Image: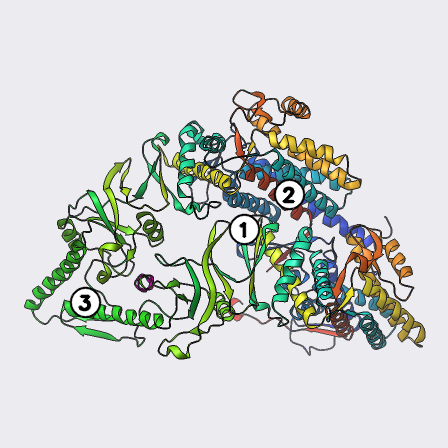
């Protein structure tokens, strides 16, 4: 519209609005481009043949990972829309724990489709509403495809955990780690609340040395410290009676400032003797209850134990573990079925926990203290992860966390769904058919949504070095013939019934990936301006 | 300028220039938020330039304006009215700014026709009076019929929410908000409604909980479930009662005496705990930390002790359980304890929270919001807050009007008629006022990508009959009957938008000189 452009403050009119819209479109496009860039960055790590990323952080640490949430978290993006994608992956991590890459890849594909729709002049809110409808429909389709699973069906649980592990560095150990994760979660389910699991009851301990093969689940309690043997105390105690103390075995200290005044040297001896007697008195009280293992909480105000008290404790044949963090107290007392004791006067036998054996063992680079055969053990589990170097160890821990989350998802929502891109293709097919029954713009947007979902099998195939186009088209074909569970079998490099191949994942992972990705894309679409503020 | 009356670097703008600067500033602000108006309005990203570059995504006018850097004095006036609107009624924060902007845009045209600002102001005043009267006369009141009143409330909440992120689940959230507000039984004390945000799940998983939820943990070894709880809410140090005089110290000459003092300190603590327990309580909530020793004592006595509840938490807890915050424990008779039927630990998402149900103050409730990310949650909280505010003010003043541009068109028509009856230049200003009112529905249409010129003229024709209920239905993109579609708005919100927008534009119109004081010099940098 030439000529009409120079009307400064001329009371609105078409020209001004035109200029305005131009700017808004630019911002929207910039947001979409940023979102797509983030998605492209993690795309290659999707699937069992996905590659890993090496991240070098600002302070020089190196992380090698395949976990989408970790990659994005460390990327330190600045663009606001890109940040939203990072948040998206975090949310998926919270909700489902797995599928953190998938969710970002789907969001990226949706953004790509939105860009085309916007280019055709569809109003953003129309796209946004249609996407919402499509995602609800997609969740319906997925739910219809799902197979119910019982918690007693351990094999299915193991299968889904190993699907999650297969895409990680530690995939060759999936046959070991998957049952481990399943047992760990099943062990902590509270019969009173069968539908929820608190993963804080599963403690994962990392120790350098050995290989991932040596990872084990321990029915009992493990401390990441060695027993204190400065004074030659015992390192192995059978029929242990364990006391968890929150007071200190050291000379008294008051909160109010105090000085001890020594006026001549005879007094010095007396004070030393008194100190000894004081500590000896405490230890006698401890010993009197039959306690032979002592866990001492860390104290910042004064020494939790002194050399002197350690010496006496060693003489009394009491195994001492010091520097227990306050946050761990709850976990320990739950596991050992004992109560923390905050004052020597309350040190009574009924507050102690009991175990068949408490011993210190050397593991790789350090030693740990292990308590086994605990009486009335609480519903907690400890997993000891080992690895040959710190990078593998960290990645193994992250992978194990994903596997644990997968099992937790199944406890929350007891449905399984096929993996290997099968659900995405099926949703895409059904939405495509549904789109034909709709009218107007909505139909167009739903079709775009359906096309976007094909990105998952496409990327899976691409990352595995297969021909993505032929694979995706063949998949479409097989699904159109009613073979709902056909997916890409990466190991064989062909298309098979994926349920028979034991590649399964929890329903919650797929549904939340789709609904979270849609929610995020809708939010990005609705933004028309970036305002910088204080 | 002859001579320097003002300090160096001070700026002075006079007459026409000053007015222009004021107009442009105000209109720029109005244009900025204009696109967020209406059910199909867009969102903005607010990117902080401060540390962390935190990002907020919002549709709420007040939030956008609050966080802007504004240098123009007239623009600041608009930011202020939006804030006032937020405090007073909670919603319509965008509308008020947009209307003020449109009024100024119209005024600018009049001024270019050499009409004196005072004449414009006089015309605006007559128009606003007339508009308010007609709005009042057409407002409906369903206070006496609780069932209809509830429907009104749900409809109002849905209208408010339809322009926000919650629009997809607006029915669900509208009912949620109405339930929460009706529990208040007219007190309008929004303090008693607590909103807790927890990442994870989807928005639909949000729920209203009758009772109070505290985001804290119960001490180790203490009961996790208490029925018929007597709660003592306290703010006291639970380590040791220290002597606060600086330099106070004790001198002793033997180790055993140090031990004695330590024991004495322990005993003091024990005595304090015993005093607390002597109140006959089974739940103790403290604002400060509870150390291991007292925690164990509480556990021994079977009392649930909750440490480190924040200020906000304990104040609310005291309010809803009917207790008082205590910090001395010498006379148990004087202390008011809080009560509730059941305290238990619940799990939301991955977190454990403490749930107090059957609290004394039956009005209290908690809304737990779930959502995909913290951005979604923050925006959902803002939206819900808007809805709650509107509902609370509607409960006080139960008059309702229709939405969808209906009130604006109705007022515009009456104002137009007034203009015809009024002799003199004032009538021009009155006409302009009507035009400004009509701009609101047209912006709503524009934002939705509809043909505003067509729809607004259709509306105008529909409003020619006296009792029309026509308005724009943005979802279907046509003119429709607002009553049938259930698009309602609170009378109070509309009235506040009208009055404060007019007042603000009047104030800006009166300006004929802007003096900017010289920035304060920092001598050390010179």
The image shows residue B327 at horizontal and vertical percentages of: 39, 74
Does residue B165 show up? no
Image location of residue B192, percent across then percent down: 56, 67
Residue at position x 46%, y 42% in the image? A57
Q: Nearer the viewer, residue B67 or A328?
A: A328
Quadrant of the image containing the C terminus of chain A? bottom right
Q: Secondary structure at mark 2?
A: helix
Mark 1 neighbour class, 10 Å CA radius: few under 14, some 14 to 19, many 20 or more: many
Give the extent of the magenta segment: B291-299
Quote the CA–CA distance across marks 3 and 2: 65 Å
Q: Main secondary structure of the magenta part?
A: helix
Write the residue at 8% across / 66% down: A270
**Magenta-colored stretch includes residue B296:** yes
Q: Secondary structure at mark 1?
A: strand
Labels 3 & 1 near each other (Cβ < 8 A): no
Against B198, is A206 above or below? Answer: above
- Whole-number angstrom distance, CA of label 3 to CA of label 1: 49 Å
Measured in 3D between alpha carbons, the distance from the residue under mark 2 to the one under mark 1, in whole angstroms, is 16 Å
Labels 2 and 1 in the same subunit: no
Q: Are marks 2 and 1 in contact (CB under 8 Å)?
A: no
Q: Which residue is mark 1?
A: B199
Task: Quickly name the residue at label 3.
Answer: B259
Identify the residue under disc 2: A518
Q: Is residue A356 above or below residue B462?
A: above
Question: Are the numbered discs 3 and 2 placed on the same chain, yes or no?
Answer: no
Residue at the spot x=70%, y=67% of the render?
B146
Residue neighbourhood size for the residue with mark 2, other residues' Cα within 10 Å, grouped as few (<14), some (14–19), many (≥20) = many
Measured as percent of width and height from the top left, residue A341 is found at 27, 58
């Amino acid at each position: 519209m030439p000529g009409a452009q120079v009307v400064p403050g001329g009371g609105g009119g078409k020209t001004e609005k035109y200029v305005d819209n131009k700017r808004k479109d630019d911002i929207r496009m910039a947001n979409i481009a940023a979102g797509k860039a983030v998605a492209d960055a993690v795309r290659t790590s999707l699937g069992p043949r996905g590659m890993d990323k090496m991240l070098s952080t600002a302070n020089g640490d190196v992380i090698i990972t395949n976990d989408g949430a970790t990659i994005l978290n460390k990327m330190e993006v600045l663009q606001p829309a890109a940040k939203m994608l990072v948040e998206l992956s975090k949310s998926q991590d919270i909700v489902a724990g797995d599928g953190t890459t998938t969710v970002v890849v789907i969001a990226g594909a949706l953004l790509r489709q939105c860009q085309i729709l916007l280019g055709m002049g569809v109003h953003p809110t129309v796209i946004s509403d249609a996407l919402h409808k499509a995602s609800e429909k997609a969740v319906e389709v997925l739910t219809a495809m799902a197979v119910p699973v019982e918690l007693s069906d351990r094999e299915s649980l193991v299968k889904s955990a190993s699907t999650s592990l297969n895409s990680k560095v530690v995939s060759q150990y999936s046959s070991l780690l998957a049952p481990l994760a399943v047992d760990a979660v099943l062990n902590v389910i509270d019969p009173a609340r069968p539908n929820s699991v608190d993963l804080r009851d599963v403690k994962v301990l990392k120790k350098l040395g050995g290989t991932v093969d040596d990872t084990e689940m321990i029915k009992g309690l493990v401390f990441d410290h060695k027993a204190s043997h400065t004074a030659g105390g015992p390192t192995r105690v059978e029929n242990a009676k364990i006391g968890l103390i929150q007071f200190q075995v050291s000379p008294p200290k008051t909160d109010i400032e105090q000085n001890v005044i020594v006026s001549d040297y005879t007094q010095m001896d007396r004070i030393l003797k008194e100190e000894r007697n004081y500590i000896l008195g405490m230890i006698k009280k401890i010993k009197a209850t039959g306690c032979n293992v002592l866990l001492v909480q860390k104290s910042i105000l004064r020494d939790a134990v002194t050399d002197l008290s350690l010496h006496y404790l060693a003489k009394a044949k009491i195994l001492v573990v010091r520097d227990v963090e306050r946050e761990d107290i709850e976990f320990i007392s739950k596991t050992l079925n004992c109560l923390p004791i905050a004052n020597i006067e309350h040190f009574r036998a009924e507050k102690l926990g009991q175990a068949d054996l408490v011993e210190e063992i050397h593991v790789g680079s350090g030693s740990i203290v292990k308590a086994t055969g605990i009486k009335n053990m609480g519903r907690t589990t400890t997993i000891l992860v080992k690895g040959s170097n710190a990078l593998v160890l960290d990645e193994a821990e992250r992978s194990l966390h994903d596997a644990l989350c997968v099992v937790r998802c199944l406890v929350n929502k007891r449905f399984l769904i096929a993996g290997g891109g099968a659900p995405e293709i099926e949703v895409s097919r059904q939405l495509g058919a549904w789109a034909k029954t709709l009218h107007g713009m909505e139909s167009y947007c739903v079709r775009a949504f359906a096309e976007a979902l094909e990105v998952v099998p496409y990327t899976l195939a691409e990352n595995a070095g297969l021909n993505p186009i032929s694979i995706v088209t063949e998949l479409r074909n097989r699904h159109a013939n009613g073979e709902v569970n056909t997916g890409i079998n990466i190991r064989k490099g062909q298309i098979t019934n994926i349920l028979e191949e034991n590649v399964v994942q929890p329903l919650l992972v797929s549904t939340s990936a789709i609904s979270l990705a849609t929610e995020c894309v809708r939010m990005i679409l609705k933004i028309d301006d970036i305002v910088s503020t204080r | 300028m002859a001579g320097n009356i003002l300090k160096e670097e001070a700026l002075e703008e006079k007459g026409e220039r000053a007015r222009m600067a004021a107009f442009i500033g105000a209109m720029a602000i109005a244009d900025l938020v204009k696109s967020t108006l209406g059910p199909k309005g867009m969102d903005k990203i607010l990117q902080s330039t401060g540390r962390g570059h935190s990002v907020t995504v919002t549709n709420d006018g007040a939030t956008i304006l609050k966080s802007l850097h504004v240098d123009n004095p007239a623009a600041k006036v608009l930011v202020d009215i939006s804030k006032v609107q937020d405090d007073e009624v909670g919603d319509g924060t965008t509308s008020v700014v947009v209307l003020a902007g449109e009024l100024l845009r119209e005024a600018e045209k009049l001024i270019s026709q050499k009409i004196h600002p005072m004449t414009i102001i006089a015309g605006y005043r007559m128009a606003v009076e007339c508009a308010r009267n007609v709005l009042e006369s057409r407002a409906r009141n369903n206070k006496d019929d609780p069932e209809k009143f509830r429907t009104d409330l749900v409809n109002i909440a849905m209208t408010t929410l339809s322009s926000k992120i919650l629009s997809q689940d607006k029915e669900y959230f509208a009912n949620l908000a109405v339930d929460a507000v009706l529990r208040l039984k007219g007190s309008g004390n929004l303090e008693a409604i607590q909103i807790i945000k927890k990442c994870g799940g989807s928005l639909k998983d949000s729920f209203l909980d009758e009772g109070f939820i505290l985001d804290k943990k119960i001490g180790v070894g203490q009961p996790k479930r208490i029925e018929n709880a007597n709660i003592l809410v306290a703010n006291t140090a639970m380590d040791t009662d220290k002597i606060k005089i600086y330099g106070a110290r004790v001198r002793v000459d033997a180790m055993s005496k140090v031990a004695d003092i330590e024991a004495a300190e322990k005993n003091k603590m024990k005595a304090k705990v015993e005093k607390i327990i002597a109140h006959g309580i089974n739940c103790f909530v403290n604002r400060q930390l509870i150390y291991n020793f007292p925690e164990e004592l509480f556990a021994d006595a079977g009392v649930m002790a909750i440490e480190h509840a924040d200020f906000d938490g304990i104040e609310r807890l005291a309010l809803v359980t009917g207790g008082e915050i205590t910090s001395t424990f010498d006379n148990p008779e004087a202390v008011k304890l809080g009560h509730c039927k059941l305290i238990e630990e619940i799990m939301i998402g991955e977190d454990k929270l403490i749930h107090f149900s059957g609290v004394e103050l039956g009005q209290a409730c908690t809304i737990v919001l779930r959502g995909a990310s913290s951005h979604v949650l923050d925006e959902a909280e803002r939206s819900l807050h808007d809805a709650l505010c509107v509902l609370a003010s509607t409960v006080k003043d139960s008059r309702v009007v229709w939405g969808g541009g209906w009130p604006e068109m109705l007022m515009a028509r009456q104002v137009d008629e007034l203009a015809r009856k009024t002799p003199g230049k004032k009538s021009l200003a009155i006409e302009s006022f009507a035009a400004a009112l009509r701009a609101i529905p047209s912006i709503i249409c524009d934002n939705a990508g509809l043909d505003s010129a067509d729809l607004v003229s259709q509306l105008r024709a529909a409003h020619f009959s006296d009792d029309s209920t026509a308005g724009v239905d943005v979802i279907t993109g046509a003119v429709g009957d607002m009553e049938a579609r259930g698009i309602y708005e609170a009378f109070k919100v509309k009235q506040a938008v009208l009055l404060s927008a007019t007042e603000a534009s009047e104030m800006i119109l009166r300006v004929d000189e802007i003096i900017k004081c010289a920035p304060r010099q920092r001598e050390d940098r010179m």
